[in-house]
Amino acid sequence: MSQNDHPPNLRAPPPGATSPPSHVQKPQIYEVFHSPKPADDAKPHGDNGEAQGGQQQPGPHTRPTFTEGIQSIKSDDFLAVHKMPCAREGFLTGIGAGAVIGAGRFVLGAGIPKAANWAFGSFLLGSIIQWEYCQAQRMKERAAMARVVEVIDKKQAEKKAKIEQAMRLREEAEEKARQANKRWYKFW
């Protein structure tokens, strides 16, 4: 199961952020991005450095093996390929690459089976490369969005602090003006 398969951890605005205006029915929820923690912190270890019990136990941050990855594939996964992020871009790039390379090999004199093999190979290679590139772009975008949310939260907290500071200074000035206008004598 990849990192993208887990639902995001959601949280409310940070402390110090302004509360939503009264006309907002549903306040905004932010997605929290966590860096993976080392497996050392996940499980208690014995004297020999292995997990208790003498064998290495899989923790939440251990890398799955190839066989575990193969066993996690279900038949329904193939029916929902079109729903995966970046699948469309990958398939379109692969189809284009396969068509161009296959047709080029056929025009240059290769037989139909050999041209088809080249077309299929370039389809696979083009699809995989485009999918990986798209995934990398998505990760960059997520990191940028996390930074933007962090900056916006910080700016909102600073703006609220400035407004509160200005209100406090205005109230203090009004109180001083009232004290200055207050008479030092009383008639009765």
Image: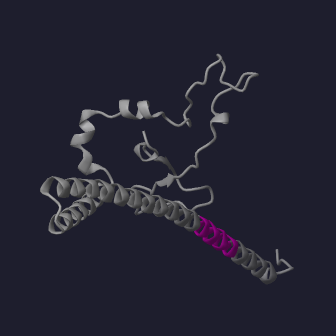
Residue reaching furthest to the left: 112
Q: Is residue 159 above or below residue 142?
A: below
Asked whether the viewer can see residue 114, the reply is yes
Q: Is residue 174 above or below residue 142?
A: below
User: Looking at the picture, how far across and down is residue 77, in whole percent?
Assistant: 27, 39
Q: Nearer the viewer, residue 110 or 72?
A: 110
User: Looking at the rendering, in which quadrant would you find the C terminus?
Assistant: bottom right
Residue 162 belongs to magenta span: yes
* Magenta stretch in the rendered image: 154-167
Asked whether the viewer can see residue 22, the reply is no
Q: Nearer the viewer, residue 139 or 121?
A: 121
User: Looking at the picture, how far across and down is residue 142, in whole percent?
Assistant: 47, 59
Relative side of 60 to 5, left or right: right
Colour option used: one colour
Q: Which of 94 and 77 is in front in this view?
A: 94
User: Looking at the rendering, in which quadrant would you find the N terminus?
Assistant: top left
Q: Residue at x 55, y 28 (%)?
A: 58
Relative side of 77 to 36, left or right: left
Residue reaching furthest to the top: 53
Q: In this view, does 22 lie above or below 1?
A: below
User: Looking at the picture, how far across and down is residue 112, in whole percent?
Assistant: 13, 56
Q: Residue at x 24, y 50 (%)?
A: 82
Number of marks drawn: 0
User: Looking at the picture, how far across and down is residue 156, in whole percent?
Assistant: 58, 68
Q: Residue at x 66, y 19 (%)?
A: 52
Look at the magenta stretch and give its main secondary structure: helix
Displayed quadrant of residue 6:
top left
